[in-house]
Image: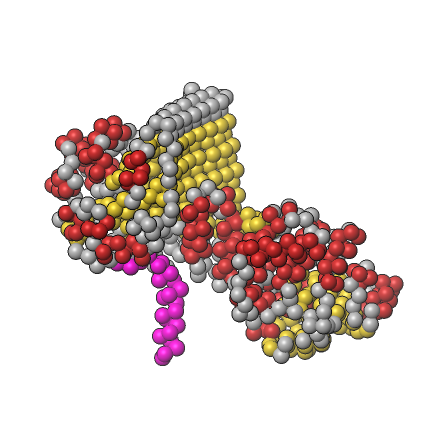
Amino acid sequence: MLEIKNLHVAVDGKEILKGIDLIINAGETHAIMGPNGSGKSTLSYTLAGREGYDVTKGRILYKHQDLGEMSPEERAGNGVFLAFQYPVEIPGVPNTTFLKEALNAVRRYRGEEELDAMSFIKLVRQKTKELGISEDMLKRAVNVGFSGGEKKRNEILQMAILNPVLAVLDETDSGLDIDALKIVSDGVNALRSPERATLVITHYQRLLDHIVPDYVHVLANGRIQRSGGKELANELEEKGYSEFAEAAE
Amino acid sequence: MGAITNTVAQVREMTEEKYKYGFVTHIETETAPKGLNEDIIRFISAKKSEPGWLLDWRLKAYRYWLNMSEPRWQKPQFPEIDYQDAYYYSAPKSMSDKPKSLDEVDPELLKTYEKLGIPLHEQEVLAGVAVDAVFDSVSVATTFKAKLEEVGVIFCPISEAVQRCPDLVKKYLGSVVPYTDNKHATLNSAVFTDGSFVYVPKGIRCPMELSTYFRINAENTGQFERTLIIADEDSYVSYLEGCTAPMRDENQLHAAVVELITLDNAEIKYSTVQNWYPGDKNGRGGIYNFVTKRGACRGRNSKISWTQVETGSAITWKYPSCILQGDNSVGEFFSIAITNNAQQADTGTKMIHLGQNTKSKIISKGISAGRADQTYRGLVRMGPKAAGARNYTQCDSLLIGDTCGAHTVPYIESKNKKALVEHEATTSKISEDQLFYLRQRGIDEESAVALVVNGFCREVLQQLPMEFAVEAQKLVGISLEGSVG
């Protein structure tokens, strides 16, 4: 589904990713772990198509299409979803309005009929219930005054409603207490299916106790230094990243 | 070759022709000779069969006007206006026989309003909204007049009110905005053509929204409408005006005057959706919107509330104000001003607190994009007798891109130690973070801007009558098209 070939990415002229190769098939969950500054967020922003993240070499194929040719909204329409590390506040815009706009934009893109107000509310109620999210969060302005945990839960709610094909979770565990971590992980796990793929980006191993990956990759210094099964995460937890930082020197 | 032509066409579509109200109605008109002098004023007065006192008032204003200079304290500057190079009266010829009913009105005119989304046949219009349609210098039709008369509400063109209820007009016309007020208002007093008149009698809550739709059509013609609304004791009325004009390369002057009067316990809610032609993206053409709007809360516990959504015009110069005379009276001003491309706006309000325990609230949201420049200018004055008076002001500016400007100029004068004035102001930019976040969720860039801006304006949009809030939200999006990317 996703094929990253020799990807080089520069931000402000500085090369951050220095040749990434990664293949993710439908049904798989991959984890990318790495120290701060290793390029984890750069990878997630590049996948989502953020301006200023320039692919200088290599390419990203998604469902056999060149992802680099698509605008962020086209990628979203094609099923790429990024759960942000720092979800953004949109003052004055009720969460429901935002969710409805997003869902209908994506549906229009996919050539599906837009949902009317009634069917939309029904869908949102069902999803909030499944995810154990209070409906009160729907009436509030997008992420404004939300706690860290609420913001992350809101990301998962958006994911559940937009129903992506490829979900990229960027440090979704940061700033979460153990209960929130459980809710978020349950939400992600509920979406796992043979048609979908998930890429979990994290600094810590603890998230991977809840979202168990099929593959773990260590990213340091702009390259994938090592790949393995879920046991690699445990090894990293014990030994830390220092080995990779040195190897990359 | 084909590709280039296509691109040019597309670009044009993206910029100027986004203004979908820019069409011209081709119709035979009757115009006064070009220029301005006492004969022209007599011509207008005679066209409206006005009584002598009104002609005298017009002439007094005209003579006063001759020695006035234009206000130059506002930020937008513009070339000297050649007042002799314009027409001061233009009316569809078919209107000179004074059609008795819609069936007698020229179908071309009815079509124009239909195209604008304002059908005038009562069975077709928005339920619960009565419309007065003003085309250049005359009122074309007023709907639901009879239904309103059942409860004693008078809603008609001001030219008709002069005939039907001269005492009311004589008593209140110019009582809030005197003919000596400022050069634009004085010119209006001399040459005003049509506009709406509303009288709501004692104890009546007007059963429907009242609305006037102003349309400038003729070339080189100024529109000088005059609106007068009187809410007698214990009454309530909600009124909305909308405005559009064709696209033309030269600037056209629109100098209106609106006067509101509330007596004891009465309330007027006045909303404006102003979408005059803003000019092209290089600032060529567009309406000069120089408007004097003022309300007097004469009675105790009375209230006047202004809500405006200003998206059009090349230059907007407008300060809807409240004079809070009656004790415990309340004034409100809710404003959204959007300027894009080369548009300029200098707008705000004046809250003049004269009575005890008077209260006022000002919420102003300014959005600038392109090379536009915008100023909020507001005055809050606490008079010596305004013990216990309070004002709260909040001015927020939102900038899109880095070539536009926003300025806030609040004037505060307090002559009473027991009065309280609060002022808050913020300036922010639409952030890359917000746009990327929304686009990642599938929302295209222009819709993302519209969503952020609608959120920014929410407090004010909520003040609009329901029937118009949705339209206004769309207008916010349309006005900002082409402002990013």
Is the residue B355 above or below the residue A174 in the image?
Answer: above
**Residue A32: % across, % down:** 75, 67
Q: In this view, does B384 lie to the left or right of B134?
A: right
Point 35% across, 41% down: residue = B210
Q: Is residue A149 above or below residue B175?
A: below
Specify the segment rendered in magenta: B1-24
Is B201 in front, or is A75?
Answer: B201
Quadrant of residue B415 in the image?
A: top left
For the N terminus of chain B, the quadrant is bottom left
Q: Position of residue B218 (x, y in %)?
A: 22, 53
| Outermost left residue | B39
User: Is B120 placed left or right of B358 in the picture?
Assistant: left
Seen at 88% across and 63% down, the residue is A238
Taken as a whole, is the magenta stretch helix, strand or loop?
helix
Query: Does residue B82 appear in this view?
Result: no
Q: Residue at 82% across / 73% down in the picture? A: A228
In-front residue for pair B44/B167: B167
> Does A51 sit above or below residue A150?
below
Q: Position of residue B137 (x, y in %)?
A: 22, 46
Q: Is residue A212 visible?
A: yes
Q: In this view, does A19 lie above or below B31?
A: below
Residue B125 placed where, x, y %? 34, 49
User: Between B122 and A224, which is closer to the camera in this rendering?
Assistant: B122
Front-lying residue, A37 or B222: B222
